[in-house]
Structures are given as structure tokens and as C-alpha cells.
Amino acid sequence: MKLHINIESHGGLLLVTASGDVEFDGALKLFKQACDTAEEKGTNKILVNTFAVNGELSVYERYQIGVEIAAYVKQRQLNSRLAIVGKPPTMDGFGVRVAQNRDLVTNAFSSQQEALNWLDSWPS
């Protein structure tokens, strides 16, 4: 089973729900598609829910996703706020820290409500 995503727009928030088995190419595509869709919808707040995702990426793959997504957002000059919720081992926050170190406004959370609260603290 591959990684599947569902994208919904809720006012000024883009909710991306992922399910299935994590793999590098699918995860990278998910984040790029989320950023592109947010730009199309005119929102800068993105919540990615990975609770229904199984598996684990290598440390190097998580590093690469953080680097590539930060570069993608910068290259496209997006003003994205990216909150990611999930559970170990699928989501441990390492890729988020890598992206933060490259100036992407992002954070990892263990609950959707925490992520929503963080996103609400940013202006639209």
C-alpha cells in the first residue's frame, strides 16, 4: 500500500491527511503538493496529519525531506506555516528541525489541537 493523501480547505487552513505506508518519494510529493495547493487556495497555514501513516524513513531520508521542502518553499517564495502531527516512529520531528534550521516556519506536534493552536497564533 502506498502513501495516500486527502486535501481539504477549511477557511484559512489547508488540512492534509495522509494514510498508508511511508516512503521517501511519496512523503516528499505530499509536502510539495500541500504547499502548491495552499498557494492555489490562497492560504499559508498547512496542517499535515500523519497519524494513519505506517513505517519509518531513515535518518538520511528525513534529513533530505527537511532540506528539500525548506528549499522548495524558499524557491517558490511561499509564506507557509507548516504544522505536522503524528506519532513515532513515523514522525519524530527530526525532519522538522532540519527545515526549521533552514528558516521554514514549521513545527511538530503529538495532537491535532496543539497544531491548530500553533497555527492560530500566526496571522493569515
Image (spheres, rainbow, N blue to C red):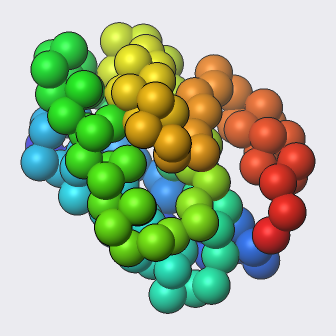
Specify the quadrant that holds the N terminus.
top left
How many marks the image carries: the answer is 0
Residue 70, x across and y down, in percent? 38, 48
Is residue 13 at least partly visible in the picture? yes
Q: Say which residue appears at 38% left-offset and 73% top-offset.
A: 76
Of 75 and 97, the residue lying toward us: 75
Residue 77 vs residue 61: left or right?
right
67 versus 30 height, above or below: above
Is residue 96 at least partly visible in the picture? no
Q: Say which residue appears at 51% left-offset and 45% top-offset.
A: 104
Residue 122, x across and y down, in percent? 82, 54
Residue 27, x across and y down, in percent? 25, 45
122 versus 91 height, above or below: below
Residue 116 vs residue 78: left or right?
right
Q: Which of the 4 quarters of the picture holds residue 36?
A: bottom left
Residue 90, x across and y down, in percent? 34, 21
Of 28 and 66, the residue lying toward us: 66
Q: Say which residue appears at 78% left-offset and 31% top-offset.
A: 114
Residue 17 vs residue 89: left or right?
right
57 versus 105 height, above or below: above
Q: Which of the 4 quarters of the picture holds residue 42?
A: bottom right
Q: Say which residue appears at 62% left-offset and 54% top-offset.
A: 81
Specify the quadrant that holds the C terminus.
bottom right
